Image (tube, rainbow, N blue to C red):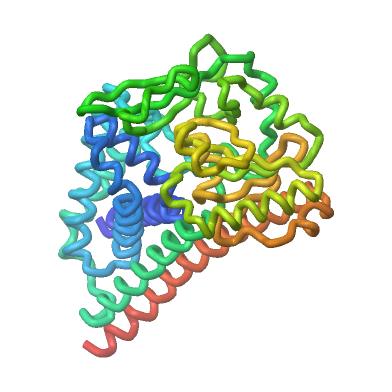
Amino acid sequence: MRYLRAICRFTVGIIFILSGFLKAVDPIGNSLKIDEYLKAFHLGFLDFTSVPAGILLSAAEFLIGVCILKGIKMKLFSRVALIFISFFTLLTLYSAIFNPVQDCGCFGEAIHLSNWETFFKNVILLGCAIVIFLQRDQFKPIASAKWNYIYIGGYSALILGISICALLYLPQIDFGVFKAGTDLTTSADAQPEHEYEVVFTYSKDGEEKTFTLENLPDSSWTFVDSQTKLISASSYTDGNTELILKTGDGIYVTNEVLGSGRPLFLLSLYNCSKISAKKLERIAAIRDTLVASGADFYILSGNSPEESQVLFTNFNILYTDYKNAISLNRSNGGLTYINDGTVIRKWSSCETPDRFDDVLCEDSEVVTANVVIKEQLFVEITIFVILFMILIIRFFSKIIYSRTK
C-alpha cells in the first residue's frame, strides 16, 4: 500500500502541477476556453468573470498538485483534490457525450485531448484521488503548521505572479496556432476564396441576432461578439485556426496581404473601449515609423466595423473574428511582425519598441529562432526549478521536522 500511495500521490501531483502551470502561462487563452463553456451552458452573461476565474482555476490546480506531491496538509488537500477531480470527471463525461466544446483545455494550448481522452484521464486521476483520500491518515507531516502556510503562500505567489505577468505582457511561451515560426501562407493557400464568413452578433431589447459586414444593423443595436463561420466545404473545419483577413467591404485579402513581399505588422484589436487617446497616439507613431521603413501596417480588428472606424479614422483596418485577433496576439493593441507569410515576433501593447531598425535589419529566421529558444528555456528551466524546489524542500523539511518533534 505504501508504494501505491506514492504512485497515486506522484500521478495526481505531477498532472495537477502541469495543468495549472500550462494554464497560468496563458491566462487569456484559458479565459477563452472558460468562455466556451459558459456559452455552452447558456451562461454567457458571466463572460466578464472568465479571466479572473481562469487565473484562480490555474492557481488552484497548481497549488493542489504542489501540496499533494510535497505532502503538505494532506488531510485537507486530499479532500480538495477528490472534490475537484469528481466535479471535472462529471463535467468531462457530459462533454464527451454531448460535445458542447471540442477541447476541454485541461493543459491549455500545449496539449490537446479529445473529450473522451480527457474523461478517461480524469477517471484514472479519480481512482488515484480516492486512494489518497482513503489513506490520508497514513501520510506523515513534513513541516510544522507555520511552515506549511509559508509554503502554501510562497507557491501561490509564484503561480499568480506568472499569470499576472503573462496578462500584463505576453505569455512566456506561445502554444497557440499563430506562434513564432508559423507559416501562415500554407493554410491561406489551401483555402478557397470566400470559404469563411465573419459574422457579428448584436443585441437589442434582450434579443440577439447575427449580421455580416455587408448587412450591419443601425446604432440602436449593441455589439456583442464576432466570429468566423465556415460557409463552404473544406478540409479545414475550424475557422479559428486559420488567419482570416477581410476588408470593410467584405473582401477576403489574406493571400494579398501576406504575399505583398514587404514586412507586415498587424496590431491586434479586440477591445476598442480599452484604447485610450494616449495609446492611440502611440499606435499612430508606430504606424508612421513602420511605413517610413517600407513595411505594411494594419489594424486587425475583432470588433465591429463602426467601433473600429470611429476610433481608427486614419488607419488601414482589416477585420477578423474576436478569437482570431486574440489568438494572433494575446495583448489588446499588441503588435505581430510577419515576414514572407511567417510569424516572426510579437510584442505586447506596453512593450512595443520605439524603433524597428534592428528587427527589420536582422535575419528574420534568426529572430524567430531566438524567440523559440527563449520560450523553450523558460518552460524547461521553470518546471525543473519548481519540481527541484518541491523535492528538495520536502526532503529537508522532513528531516528538520522529525528532529524538532
In the picture, residue 235 is in which quadrant? top right
Q: Residue at x 63, y 18 (%)?
A: 191
Query: In this orientation, which residue lies closer to the viewer: 128 or 177?
Result: 177
Q: Residue 390: x, y in percent?
A: 41, 69
Q: Quick one: which residue is furthest to the top in this view?
A: 233
Q: Quadrant of the N terminus?
A: bottom left
Q: Residue 202: x, y in percent?
A: 34, 28
Query: In this orientation, which residue lies closer to the viewer: 218 or 97?
Result: 218
Q: Residue at x 29, y 51 (%)?
A: 53
Q: Residue 185: x, y in percent?
A: 70, 28
Query: In this orientation, which residue lies closer to the viewer: 154 or 308?
Result: 308
- Residue 10 visible at all: no
Q: Is residue 11 above or below residue 234?
A: below
Q: Is residue 278 above or below residue 142?
A: above
Q: Residue at x 68, y 42 (%)?
A: 297
In the picture, residue 9 is in which quadrant? bottom left
In the picture, residue 313 is in which quadrant? top right
How many marks do you count on the picture?
0
Q: Quadrant of the C terminus?
A: bottom left
Q: Residue 2: x, y in percent?
A: 27, 59
- Residue 320 visible at all: yes
Instruction: Answer left or right for 14 relative to 76.
Output: right
Instruction: Answer left or right for 350 relative to 22.
Output: right
